[in-house]
Amino acid sequence: MNNFIKAMLKAGIIMKSESIGLRIYNHIKLNDEYKISIQCSAHHHCSPRRLTGIPHYDMYEVAFIHNEGGFCYPEKLIDFPRKQELDLCCEGTVFDYVPKDLVEDVYNYLKE
């Protein structure tokens, strides 16, 4: 199982509504500066865009949050080997339809 999926399961759900296909996971602390939000449900930019088990998604919605508050782009990502690929998913402050392997790589890179 992917490290980020283990972290999502450990972080837990803060809101869920089966009737409308919504599920929101707590943010995951990466380090002393940043948290990551990884989301997947019918209301997020993920694939499939429906409510199913976390490992069954191919793509996820991702955002980075500064521990002092607010969305951000972590400075450490400037040297991330797959930065160009990640940037293609960026829509303002949220990264849409991020492939599972890229989520895993960025999670592990920022967790170091």
Image: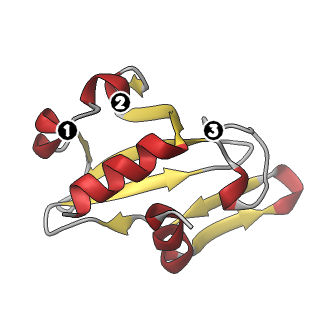
The image's mark for residue 14 is none
Q: Earlier in the sequence, mark 1 or mark 2?
A: 1
Q: Is residue 66 visible?
A: no
The amino acid at mark 3 is Cys
Q: Residue 62 at what x, y percent from top left? A: 44, 44
Q: Earlier in the sequence, mark 3 or mark 2?
A: 3
Mark 1 in CB contact with mark 2 (< 8 angstroms): yes
At x 68% / y 47%, what residue is drawn?
A: 57
In front here: 19 or 60? 60
The amino acid at mark 1 is Phe
* SS at mark 1 in the image: loop
| Residue 5 falls left or right of residue 40 | left
Q: Nearer the viewer, mark 1 or mark 3?
A: 1
Q: Residue 4 at what x, y percent from top left? A: 45, 62
Query: Neighbour class for label 1 at 10 Å: few (<14), some, many (≥20)?
Result: some
In this rendering, the answer to whether 52 lies above or below 102 is below
* SS at mark 3 in the image: loop
Give the residue at mark 1: 80
Give the residue at mark 2: 86
Q: Earlier in the sequence, mark 1 or mark 3?
A: 3
What is the quadrant of the C terminus in the image?
bottom left
Query: Neighbour class for label 2 at 10 Å: few (<14), some, many (≥20)?
Result: some
In this rendering, the answer to whether 99 lies above or below 5 is above
Give the residue at mark 3: 46
Most distant residue in the right direction: 19
Most distant residue in the bottom direction: 10
* SS at mark 2 in the image: helix
